[in-house]
Image: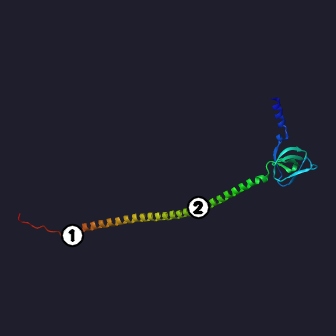
Amino acid sequence: MNKALIITLALSLSPAAFAEQAHIADDVYVFMNSGPSNQYRISGRVSSGETVTVLERRDEYVQIRTKSGRSGWVPAPYVASGISQLSEMPELKQALESSQKQIEAQKQEIDVLKHSAQSRQAESENSQAQVETLQNEIADLKARIANMDQSNLIRWLTHGGLVALGGVLLGLLVPYLPKKRKARNDWF
């Protein structure tokens, strides 16, 4: 049991346990040295934006391991932590294309909605003009009805007056009309 604890402790203290994800700065091309200074032999080169694992830091140099498994030392200012912008570029391009397609679709939808709104506005204005025309016709018809009621009243009064006048004249003339004489029947 003590051996397992010692092995676990030893593994946890190894340089790989302290490894952090990093990348070579996006604007440089770096040579790797076999030791922590430029006095050591160049053991390879690393392209800008390449993802690396930081194994150890000493003074102004950082020991790294590339994805291909090569390791070496590079100046610390050329190693940036996190993910490279170059490795994010394809995802960003894809997201940009998707956003541009979505924007185009939304522009088309906006154009359709604008056209629909304009046609609805024209329909609304047309309906408003029809409403105004109908209201004018209703007002005209109400005025005609009011005039008809008044002229009907005048006509009825005129007819009634004429009938009354005719009755008065007939009443005055009836006594002067010759009366029909009764036939005398003396037989009785």
Instruction: Provide residue 164's location: percent of width, then percent of height.
Output: 30, 65
Q: How crowded is mark 2: few (under 14 residues within 10 Å), some or many (20 or more)?
A: few
Instruction: Provide residue 102's location: percent of width, then percent of height.
Output: 67, 57
The relative height of residue 41 versus residue 129 in the rendered view (above or below) is: above
The circle on residue 176 is 1
Three-letter residue code for mark 1: Tyr
Q: Residues within 10 Å of mark 1 (few under 14, many from 20)?
A: few
Instruction: Provide residue 137's location: percent of width, then percent of height.
Output: 47, 65
Question: Residue drawn at (27%, 66%), measured in percent from left and top?
Answer: 167
Q: Taking 9 as reference, is 155 left or right?
A: left
Question: Residue drawn at (44%, 64%), measured in percent from left and top?
Answer: 141
Q: Which colour scheme is used?
A: rainbow
The relative height of residue 110 versus residue 39 in the rendered view (above or below) is: below
Residue reaching furthest to the top:
1
Q: Which of the two discs, 2 and 1, labels the residue nearer the N terminus?
A: 2
Q: Which of 3 and 188 is in front in this view?
A: 3
Q: Taking 105 as reference, is 46 left or right?
A: right
The relative height of residue 5 versus residue 155 in the rendered view (above or below) is: above
| Secondary element type, mark 2 | helix
Question: Residue drawn at (70%, 57%), measured in percent from left and top?
Answer: 97
| Secondary element type, mark 1 | helix
The circle on residue 116 is 2
Instruction: Provide residue 171's location: percent of width, then percent of height.
Output: 25, 66
